Image (cartoon, rainbow, N blue to C red):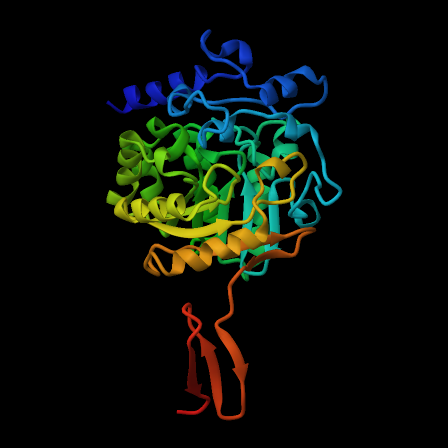
Amino acid sequence: MRESETGEWKKQLSECYRSVADFPVDFELSLTEEDYFKKESDRFRISVPKNYFGLAFSDADDPIRRQFMPQAGEHITLSCETDDPLGENSYKVTERLIHRYPDRVLFLASDTCAMYCRHCFRRDYLSTDPPPLTRKEIHRAAEYLRSHLEVKEIIISGGDPLIMDNSKLDELLSIFKESRPDIVFRMASRMPVVLPSRITDSLTDLLSKYKPLFFITQYNHPRELTDKSRQAVSLLVNKGIPVFNQAVLLKSVNDSVDVLAELFQELLRCSVKPYYLFQGDLAAGTSHLRVPITKGLELMKELRSRISGLALPIFAVDLPGGGGKVPLTESYIQEITETAVVFKDRNERIYSYPVES
C-alpha cells in the first residue's frame, strides 16, 4: 500500500505539463498567453499537474488558469519590482538558510515545484537551476541552529520541500532535530492543493515523528478545495498536524469579498486555519496579478462584517527590500486621551473605553 502511494504521486509528477506542446490538442492559448511565448527571453519555467490543469476553464481569466498560465505581463518589469523582492539574499547565513527574524529561520530545501505559480516571489531563484541539496548544506544549517539558541522555529520551504521523497525528507528533519531537539518545524508546501496524491499515510506518519510541526499551505480559490485535496488535508489533521493557510491576494483570482469569504469559511470546514492573506510581492513580472493595496484593505473591512474572527486571516505585506512582514490593519482607534481610548466601529459609531478601569 505504501509503495503504491509513492508510485502514484511520482507518476503524476512525471506527467506534469511542462510546455505548451504538452497541453491537450484542444487547449487554445489566449492572445496575451500567445504574446508571452512569442517573445524570446528568459522565461520562468512552466509545470502544472494534470489534476490541477483539469480544474481550469477555457476562459483565459479563469482564476485557476491565471495561477499556472504565463501571460505577456510577465515580460514587464516595473521600476518597483526586483528579482529578490523580500531581500532574502542579504539574510542568508548559509547556502540555503535565511535568518531574517530573530526567532526563526527558513531553509530552502528544494529548488523545484510540482507547479510553478505565476505570482511566485522566488521565481528568480527557481529559474537559476542551483545544484541539488547536499548533506553538507543540511549539516551547515544544523550547525547554525546549534549555535543560535535564539532560533525557536525552522520553516522548511523552497521550491516545495515535498518534491523530495520520504527518505530524504526524513533525513533532513532528523538532522535538524538531532541538532536542536527543541526546534519547532513549519512545513511549507502547496502539494495538498496542486498534487494532493503526495499527501499519503506514510508521509503523515513521517511528519508526525517531528512534532511540534505545523503544515503551511496555500489555497487561493474555493475551487482548489476538491474532494481529493480535502482528503489530503484530512490525513494531516487526523495525524494531529495543524494546518494553516497563507493565501495571496491575486487580481481576477480572489479579489472579491464573495470569493474570499467562501474560501476562508470552507477552509475552516476542513479544519484549516486561514492564517495570512498576503498582498502580492513586488517580484519582477508579476504586476498583472497584483491587486492595489487599498483594495485589499477595503476587502478586509468588508470581510470583518461577514465572517467570524476564526475565519479571518491577517492581511499582511512583506516590505520591499527585506523589511519583513507587517500586518495591514485598519485602525479602529480614533484618539487616545488621558482618560479614554476612543474607537469607531465598522458602522462608524463612536465608543469610549477608559484608560484605567
**Residue 92 visible in image:** no
* Residue that lies at the very extreme toward the right in this rendered image: 79
Foreground pick, 189 / 153 = 189
**Residue 66 visible in image:** yes
Residue located 41% across and 29% down the image: 194
The x and y percentages for residue 176 are 48, 46
| Count of residue discs | 0
Q: Is residue 266 left or right of residue 133?
A: left
Residue located 39% across and 60% down the image: 304
Foreground pick, 204 / 37 = 37
Residue located 44% across and 33% down the image: 162
Image position of 332 with respect to 55: above or below: below
The x and y percentages for residue 310 are 33, 58
Say which quarter of the image contains residue 308. bottom left
The x and y percentages for residue 344 are 45, 75
* Residue that lies at the very extreme toward the top in this rendered image: 25
Q: Is residue 328 left or right of residue 131?
A: left
Foreground pick, 264 / 180 = 264
Image position of 346 with respect to 112: above or below: below
The x and y percentages for residue 350 are 44, 79
Image quadrant holding the N terminus, namely: top left
* Residue that lies at the very extreme toward the front in this rendered image: 348
Image quadrant holding the C terminus, namely: bottom left
